[in-house]
Image (spheres, rainbow, N blue to C red):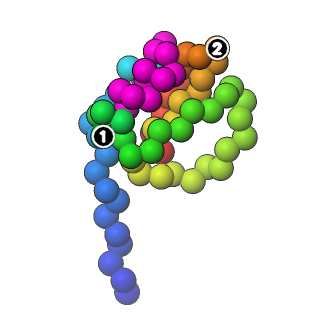
């Protein structure tokens, strides 16, 4: 049987710290903290449920982050 792969380490970061920030500033901050992929989505977007290590998702309304989660 093949070994189970170890996912890459993610930045030690709190997603809730991005809520309330301007979307562009939040993206820049996330990249500076080591997130390899940053995705901004409008409220109610239909997205797939796959988890991608190293990705940070922002829900953005009126230019501000209203929700943030890993994966």
In the image as oriented, which residue stretches furthest toward the bottom? 1
In magenta, the rendered stretch is 20-30
Q: Nearer the viewer, residue 68 or 32?
A: 32
x, y percentage for residue 42? Answer: 67, 28
Residue at 72% of width from left, 30% of height from top?
44
Above or below 28: residue 46: below
The answer to whether the residue labelled 1 contacts the one labelled 2, judged by CB atoms less than 8 Å apart, is no
Upstream in the sequence, badge 1 or badge 2?
1
Would residue 33 be counted in the magenta stretch? no
Q: Secondary structure at mark 1?
A: loop
Residue at 65% of width from left, 50% of height from top?
48
Magenta span main SS: helix
Would residue 23 be counted in the magenta stretch? yes
Could you classify mark 2 by the number of other residues whose Cα lies within 10 Å: few (under 14), some (14-19), or many (20 or more)?
few
Could you classify mark 1 by the number of other residues whose Cα lies within 10 Å: few (under 14), some (14-19), or many (20 or more)?
some
Above or below 27: residue 46: below
x, y percentage for residue 27? Answer: 44, 29
From the image, which quarter does the N terminus lie in? Answer: bottom left
Above or below 60: residue 2: below
Q: Secondary structure at mark 2?
A: loop
Q: 37 left or right of 58?
A: left
The residues bearing labels 1 and 2 have C-alpha atoms spaced at a distance of 26 Å
Residue for badge 2: 62
Residue at 46% of width from left, 15% of height from top?
21
Residue for badge 1: 34
Tell how many labels. 2
Image quadrant of residue 29?
top left
x, y percentage for residue 13? Answer: 31, 32
């Amino acid at each position: 049987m093949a070994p189970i792969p170890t996912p890459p380490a993610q930045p030690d970061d709190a997603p809730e710290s991005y809520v309330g920030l301007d979307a562009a500033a939040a993206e820049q901050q996330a990249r500076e903290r080591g997130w390899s992929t940053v995705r901004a989505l409008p409220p109610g977007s239909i997205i797939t449920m796959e988890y991608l290590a190293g990705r940070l998702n922002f829900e953005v309304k009126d230019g501000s982050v209203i929700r943030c989660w890993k994966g």
